[in-house]
Image (cartoon, rainbow, N blue to C red):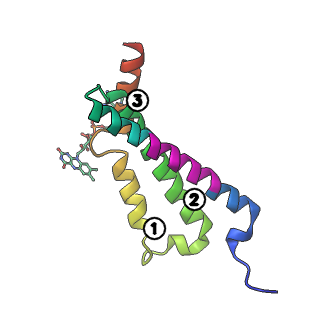
Amino acid sequence: MGDRFVTDFQGIRWTVAELSTRLEAGSLLRDKAAWMEDLGKDPVRETSMAKLLAGEISMEIISQAIQLTGSYGCYRDTPFERYLRDAKSLCIAGGTLEVMKNNIARKILG
Ligand SMILES: Cc1cc2nc3c(=O)[nH]c(=O)nc-3n(C[C@H](O)[C@H](O)[C@H](O)COP(=O)(O)OP(=O)(O)OC[C@H]3O[C@@H](n4cnc5c(N)ncnc54)[C@H](O)[C@@H]3O)c2cc1C
């Protein structure tokens, strides 16, 4: 029997499929925000949604990446620790995710 990889497990394949799909949705939302800016329309709702989704997705992805690599993901001499810090920074710098939710709610509800 040849080499087996954790990515052969269906549960792990589903995780990769789900997170890739959410990442693609975040990219499309980002592109829509940029498109609205190019058109000269107010992009605050879309930019806030894009940052909210990107922040949430990045935390999910790095958390799952550590989980899927098992103990390897916990070693300090691997890049995971930095990716986790980078993802958290995305959720804070330039406006926290809570502030993004305030922006979105204000655009929807006034
Ligand atoms: C990596 C990194 C790079 C940065 N780079 C820069 C930079 O180049 N230039 C710069 O000026 N700043 C920079 N910052 C600062 C960043 O913009 C602030 O950290 C960010 O705006 C949050 O402000 P704060 O840290 O004062 O948190 P606070 O505003 O004190 O927030 C603390 C908590 O309260 C929540 N909160 C605050 N207000 C509300 C509200 N109205 N409703 C609900 N929840 C709320 C926040 O979401 C957060 O969870 C950087 C931060 C990081 C992490």
In the figure, residue 44 lies in which quadrant? top left
21 lies left or right of 85: right
Q: Which numbered disc, 3 or 1, marks the residue that appears first in the sequence?
A: 1
Q: Which image quadrant: the N terminus?
A: bottom right
Question: Circle 1 sits on which residue?
Answer: 80
Q: Which image quadrant: the C terminus?
A: top left
Residue at point 36%, 19% (across, down): 106
Residue 10 placement (x, y as % from top left): 75, 61
SS label for mark 1:
helix
Q: Amino acid at mark 2?
A: Gln
> Looking at the image, is 38 positioned above or below residue 88?
above
In the figure, residue 101 lies in which quadrant? top left
Label 3 C-beta lies within 8 Å of the nearest ligand 1 atom: yes
Question: Circle 3 sits on which residue?
Answer: 101
The residue segment tinted magenta is 17-28
* C-alpha separation, residue under disc 2 versus residue under disc 3: 24 Å
